[in-house]
Amino acid sequence: MSYSIGVIGTGYVGLVSGTCFAESGNSVLCVDIDAQKVEKLQNGILPIYEPDLDHLLERNIKKNRLHFTTDLAKAVHQCPILFLCLPTPPDEDGSADLQYVLNAAADIAKILERDGIKEPRILVNKSTVPVGTTEKVRSVVRGITSATVEVVSNPEFLREGFAVEDFMKPDRVVVGTSSKFAEETMRDLYEPFVRSGNPIYVMDEKSAEITKYAANSFLAMRISFMNDLSNYCEAVGADIENVRIGIGSDSRIGKRFLFSGIGYGGSCFPKDVKALIHSTDMAEKPLKIMKAVEDVNYEQIVRFTNRIIDRFGTVSGRHFALWGLAFKPNTDDTREAPAFKIIERLLEEGASISSYDPEAFENTKRIFEDRITYATSAIETLINADALIIATEWNEFRKPDFSEVKKTLKEPIIFDGRNLYELHTMENAGFEYHSIGRRTILPNR
Ligand SMILES: NC(=O)c1ccc[n+]([C@@H]2O[C@H](COP(=O)([O-])OP(=O)(O)OC[C@H]3O[C@@H](n4cnc5c(N)ncnc54)[C@H](O)[C@@H]3O)[C@@H](O)[C@H]2O)c1
């Protein structure tokens, strides 16, 4: 059956979820407090870059199944299922700041109470939240209204850059609830997305909440493990890429999330690792391993930037080309982007930077304004640059015309934070090439 669904918060998760629910035949009303964003969306303009989302948005707006508003009351009136897709940024102590989620839940409850709405509502939390939040939301709602509201945990596992694909064909759907009514509704709602046989796991809400943090923290742990190991490989003359291939083909380990680089960033891993550390500390069951994961991640980017600075003695007055600003390819999201940490440090040290990214200029300009320059192509950044730095593995950086790169740079030096190129290619092309966990290529030596 199809449902009327309200999605509160129309960012990366809310917009993708809302659009995909509309695509499967539901009537969806997305709510956001950002009036400019809502206006853009009403006109079919995507405020973010996410592959495949544009045509889904267009189609579902045309079919009259997808609407956008700033009016929360409209959604509370029209929609028996309300999804919370709100930010949960880190507070100063690393804990997840729940104000957006709890305030929205309170606002919904006030509208139900004020307008005497008696039909039951299912309030589904999709934001990443610490254990106990579903209970907190329930108690906020019950403190305000006697209306029937089932509060459900439904963590989201989509990856930016593959968000539509992940939402349409999830590896699994996790639902935390003990309500039969909520369980049946959620199973029915998600049924079109799991036709290929992937599971819907219904569990207690606390386990559902922890599952999300555990998934992201585990993936962050794999990245930090490989980054830590890459430093050892460099020190003893081994090659992390060979080690990666060697362990990744073991089916117990698997090939994914084994790439060493300049550390994880983005809107999820850094904050979710912090939040899990905080929650486990509070429970006096500290997850020591996650503190190490965080330390390694911090040191990795510092080490990479130091390497650039040490190569020149001082970078004051030096000019660098930087390829890649988004925290990973196929997104315009620059939250906690490693590139930003490199930029901050090099600017502090007196260097100048010309940058290029296929999608992330708008978000970068908001932070750096005219402190760096923005080139119209990857090659343009290289003009007068003392070296090229690669921070994001966009496909278009994988096979550049190396003779043009060499000709355009002042000196043929590359610092590759993503191991995009084969060592022998760099050797043959005559570059000085610094990468992660592999020997440095020094021409003419
Ligand atoms: N981005 C991801 O890849 C991803 C993946 C899985 C889970 N998550 C989790 O999902 C949650 C949302 O993440 P996101 O990346 O979509 O965030 P986001 O910052 O992109 O979007 C949040 C949206 O909520 C809006 N908003 C804030 N307060 C509001 C209110 N009171 N009413 C209506 N709208 C309001 C903001 O204007 C913004 O558009 C977070 O908890 C995050 O950890 C994110």
Image (cartoon, grey):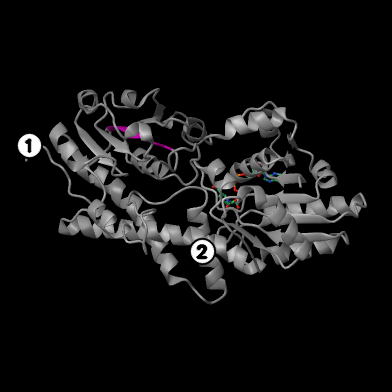
The picture quadrant where one finds residue 238 is bottom left
In this orientation, which residue lies closer to the viewer: 94 or 287?
287
* The residue positioned farthest toward the front in the image shown: 196
Is disc 1's CB within 8 Å of ligand 1? no
Judged left or right of residue 17, residue 66 is right
Over which residues does the magenta segment extend?
319-325
Residue 56 is one of the magenta-drawn residues: no
Mark 1 Cα-neighbour bin, 10 Å: few <14, some 14–19, many ≥20: few
Q: Which residue is mark 1?
A: 444
Q: Is residue 172 left or right of residue 288?
A: right
Q: Position of residue 69 (x, y in %)?
A: 75, 36
Give the residue pinned by disc 2. Answer: 214
Rate crowding at label 2 as few (under 14), some (14 to 19) or many (20 or more) other CA atoms within 10 Å: some
Q: Secondary structure at mark 1?
A: loop
**Residue at (71%, 34%) from the top-left corner?**
35
Residue at the left extreme, as displayed: 445
Distance from the alpha carbon under mark 1 to that under mark 2? 48 Å
322 inside magenta stretch = yes
Residue type at the position of mark 1: Asn
Q: Give left or right: position of 427 versus 180.
A: left
